[in-house]
Amino acid sequence: MSKALLVLEDGRTFTGEQYGAAGETSGEAVFNTGMTGYQETLTDPSYHRQVVIQTAPHIGNTGINDEDDESARIWVSGYVVRDPARRVSNWRSRRSLDDELGLQGIVGISAIDTRALTRHLRERGAMRCIISSADLEVESLLSKVRSVPQMAGADLTGDVSTPEPYTVTATGETRFTVAALDYGIKTMTPRRMAERGITTHVLPASSTAEQILATGADAVFLSNGPGDPATADAAVGVVRELLGAQLPVFGICFGNQLLGRAFGFGTYKLRYGHRGINQPVQDRLTGKVEVTAHNHGFAVDAPTEGSTETDFGAVEVSHIGLNDNVVEGLRALDVPAFSVQYHPEAAAGPHDAAYLFDRFVDLLDVRRGAAREKI
């Protein structure tokens, strides 16, 4: 196996073996604490321009299948594992992870101390890195990595969004229709809504409020996605128009950040982010603690106690992260809107947060009932 180097922008260097495609790649180095679900991680558009380090040491044992992709391609810029599986062992597997990375041109590195790398990122924060099996000169790689664009200030949703609208129909009878703004939506999200009788019209991230309202949808969904929410002024303006139109809004991840900005809150970059399928969050409405799936490097800056008066009435923090007290959800008290910072579609991940789709349906039921009473 060919030698490979991983060089961080602060000069820390790791020597290992080529994994996946040969060549060179760069991006923001982030770590994922999930022990399973690597296929869903790799194909999550929210990882665009990031090099993912798996903290679980043994990766690839179930290979790659044709059913669990969360988009049409692998989005990570690079991949870092400690001990790749020597043999694939799963009845659904169609090829090895190493082969799939090679086929899609994803440069990776293995046989490095991922625990030491993760500890370094926890202490110093997420930072740019470069992986290469082509150039093995540390000073050369260090010069290259310091010219890589930062994630702060990156506007990336246009890179990952669908270019054309498409529809995912409800399973069985259609009870409601939802317009989903695709900032990097995962395949499982419309499926979760379809299971609840929702037909979803998936729209490009650049859609205007007029185009969204023209679908005649009962509500709007704001999806996950990559990049810095501080760059998304146009999208925030659209969300404000939708709130003004009293259209129900449900957002997750990047969508939570957009909704927060629409309410007037700021956003900020986390030191090393939350990425994995084992993050504890408390629903303040019920007191219940959920184990949840996360992938975010930015968060909403909102008061965690009491409610805040905004242009759209009172808004409160509905969910809180129990590891670090980061805002993990918002709930409007005077307009039909709520959001969470994590992934209730559970792909991959636990199903503790699936009730949020039911809460969305309940909101639509209440709205429909109120409309009938006015007739």
Image (cartoon, rainbow, N blue to C red):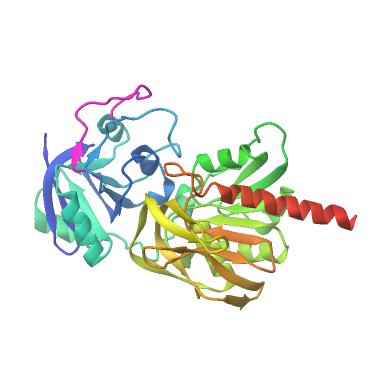
Q: Position of residue 294 (x, y in %)?
A: 41, 53
Residue 115 rendering spot, x and y as whole percentages: 18, 52
Foreground of the two, 167 or 22: 167
Residue in the foreground of this view, choosing between 245 and 277? 277
Residue 222: image x %, image y %? 57, 54
Quadrant showing the C terminus? bottom right
Q: Does any portion of residue 273 appear in the rendered image?
A: yes
Residue 190 against residue 222 in the figure, above or below: above
How many marks the image carries: the answer is: 0
- Of all residues, the one furthest to the front in this rendering is 287
Quadrant holding the N terminus: top left
Question: Which residue is depicted at the point 59% across and 77% down?
Answer: 308
In terms of image quadrants, where is residue 310? bottom right
Whether residue 166 appears in this view of the structure is no
Is residue 109 rendered to the left or right of residue 220? left
Q: Is residue 184 left or right of residue 7?
A: right
275 and 1: which one is in front?
Answer: 275
| Residue drawn where x is 18% and y is 39% of the image | 83
Q: Is residue 191 left or right of residue 301?
A: right
Q: Which residues are magenta?
A: 80-96
Image check: 154 left or right of 339? left
**Magenta stretch encompasses residue 236:** no
Residue 49 appears at what percent x and percent y?
34, 52
- Tell me which secondary structure the magenta stretch mostly adopts: loop
**Hey, which residue is sitting farthest right in the picture?**
375
